[in-house]
Image (tube, rainbow, N blue to C red):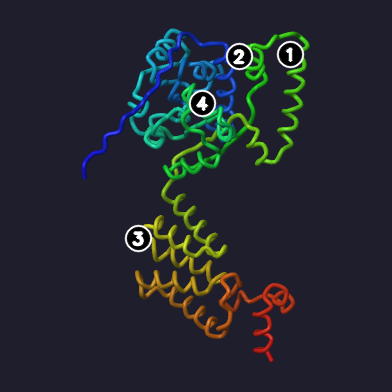
Amino acid sequence: MGALALTINVQETNYDAPTEWRMLGAKGKADHVMALCERHGIKPQSVLEVGAGDGSILRCLSESGFGERLYALEISQSGVDVIHRQQIPRLIACHAFDGYSIPFEDDFFDVLVLSHVLEHVEYERALLRELKRVSKYQVIEIPMDCNSLGDEVYHLLGPSYGHINAHSPESLRFLLSTEGFKVVDDTLGQYSLSLLEYDHFVNNSRERTPEAVEGFRRQYQKGEIEFAALPRGEQQRRASYYTVLACKEGSEERLERALRGIKRCITGGQVQAARLIFDHYIPLHLVPSCALEVARDAADVNPRIALEFLDRVVASDGENADALALRSRIETFVTSFPTCESPTIRIIPHPNRWTGTKEHLKARFPRVASIYSKLRR
């Protein structure tokens, strides 16, 4: 198969010195990084910021004493030069890079920061694989540009400052999940008063009178109270940023997540989805044990599907005593109640688990209760 050549477009920013606008934004972004790490007792020795820009976030992290050794990568040489000129305490190294290849060994960093960078990246998955390789924990923050996708003006505005992706919390979590990350924690919120006040008066050229400033701050405080009282879904629609703390998902964690998904699908009647997840995520050498676990769980919900998964066990291990015993009990029950075909009827195959009263059966399973009453007579 021939190699596929892709053109990589990298848009460099020309940095001169940290501006007031960038420093105001950096303070909040650094606070989000530190708050998520503090909630989980993460006290990093080594911290790398990828896409460090002019070093504003690094400077805030350094001033707050976060990390013993700080490192930075930035695609713009002007940004690297500005970072060096600031002489940020505990900054060990700052290098220019191509936007994808990170020149450090596996697991070199305790924490990696990627703040408001992913929306600029053409090949996100290539970068994420490198982040996962070189770090133990990752803090990734995105602007909530997804809330503006319905506005055609944003389709012009976003690319004007380099935003070519607009993730939602759900799409970011899906992207991370499919690249082998586990989201440990997350947070979303609105930008700080100082940043929004600067944007309102300075960026948008409004007259900054004492009355106007007081009115703006009063409106911000009211909005803060309203935001805190909203349910998560409505908060998401009004949020300015979304931040996740992630780490590598281990093989056992991925297996447990897959089994939970399979069981959930069977309970919800999505049998084909359960089959697809099983075939995609369960390694061949674990098929017998995992299929037996799924069959045990499915026996209560859908005995015929339980038998299907027991066939997988027997195909790999024809002498599995647990599988043969469970199959015998389920087949006996299915033979005794041939009309119980609904996949949503809960069947309890083991005698010791038949604890429901007649009233309970009548309320939840009228057809089964009727057959059960006739058999008792």
First in sequence: mark 4 vs mark 1: 4
Q: Which residue has dot 3 on it?
A: 284
Q: Is residue 113 visible?
A: no
Question: Gap in Å between the C-alphas at discs 3 and 1?
Answer: 65 Å
Which image quarter holds the C terminus? bottom right
> Mark 4 — residue?
156
Whichever of labels 3 and 1 marks the residue nearer the N terminus, that label is 1
Which circle, 4 or 3, is nearer the viewer?
Answer: 4
Residue drawn at (70%, 9%) of the image: 207
Mark 1 vs mark 2: in front: 2
- In this rendering, the answer to whether 135 lies above or below 308 is above
Q: Amino acid at mark 3?
A: Leu
Q: Are marks 2 and 3 in contact (CB under 8 Å)?
A: no
Q: Which residue is mark 1?
A: 213
Question: What kind of residue is marked 1?
Answer: Val
Left or right relative to 251: residue 234: right
Query: Disc count in the image?
Result: 4
Which kind of residue does numbered mark 4 sit on? Leu
Question: Which badge, 4 or 2, is on the more N-terminal residue?
Answer: 4
- The reply to whether dot 4 and dot 2 touch (C-beta < 8 Å) is no
Amino acid type of the residue that numbered disc 2 sits on in the rendered structure = Asn
Residue 201 position in % (x across, y down): 66, 13
Q: Which residue is mark 2?
A: 203
